[in-house]
Image (cartoon, helix red, strand yellow):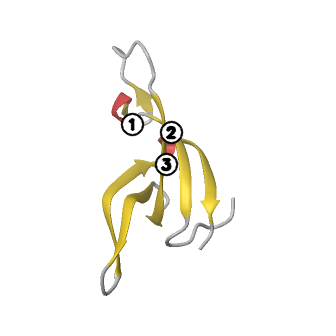
Amino acid sequence: MKKLKLGQIIKIDWVDQSYYSGPERLPDVTQVAYGSSVGWFLEENKNWLTIASERFTTDMIAYRHITTFPKRCIDKIEIIRNL
């Protein structure tokens, strides 16, 4: 996948990270939860990817409602809109 850029709108398909402890699933989980999130890409490193679900402009562009996903829980990333 191409390198993501600040402000791109992306969709992330993920496995609920609350069901994970390290790389292993917790033994008492009976059903895995799958989710999708859409937002503005903010940053990433080798372990995490962060998006914002709201963007607004005053004298600058600002973001809020920030979500960080462990990369091991991400199934797919799709670029919805390039800026």
Q: Position of residue 14 (x, y in %)?
A: 50, 39
Dot 2 lies on which element? strand
Q: Is residue 17 above or below residue 69?
A: above
Query: Circle 1 is placed at which residue position?
Result: 17
Using the image, tell me which numbered label, if any, was put on residue 65.
none
User: What residue is at 33 percent from the left and 57 percent from the top?
Assistant: 66
Query: Circle 3 is placed at which residue position?
Result: 71
Could you tell me if the residues under marks 2 and 1 are in contact, i.e. CB atoms within 8 Å? yes
Amino acid of disc 2: Trp
Amino acid of disc 3: Lys
- From the image, state whether disc 2 or disc 3 is nearer to you: 2
Badge 2, how many Cα within 10 Å: few under 14, some, many 20+?
Answer: many
User: What residue is at 37 percent from the left and 61 percent from the top?
Assistant: 54
Q: Position of residue 20 (x, y in %)?
A: 38, 32
Q: Position of residue 81 (x, y in %)?
A: 62, 63
User: What residue is at 37 percent from the left and 28 percent from the top?
Assistant: 19
- The disc, 3 or 1, on the residue closer to the chain's N-terminal end is 1
- From the image, state whether disc 2 or disc 1 is nearer to you: 2
Q: Residue furthest bottom?
A: 59
Q: Position of residue 42 (x, y in %)?
A: 44, 67
Label 2 vs label 3: CA separation?
Answer: 9 Å
Query: Circle 2 is placed at which residue position?
Result: 14
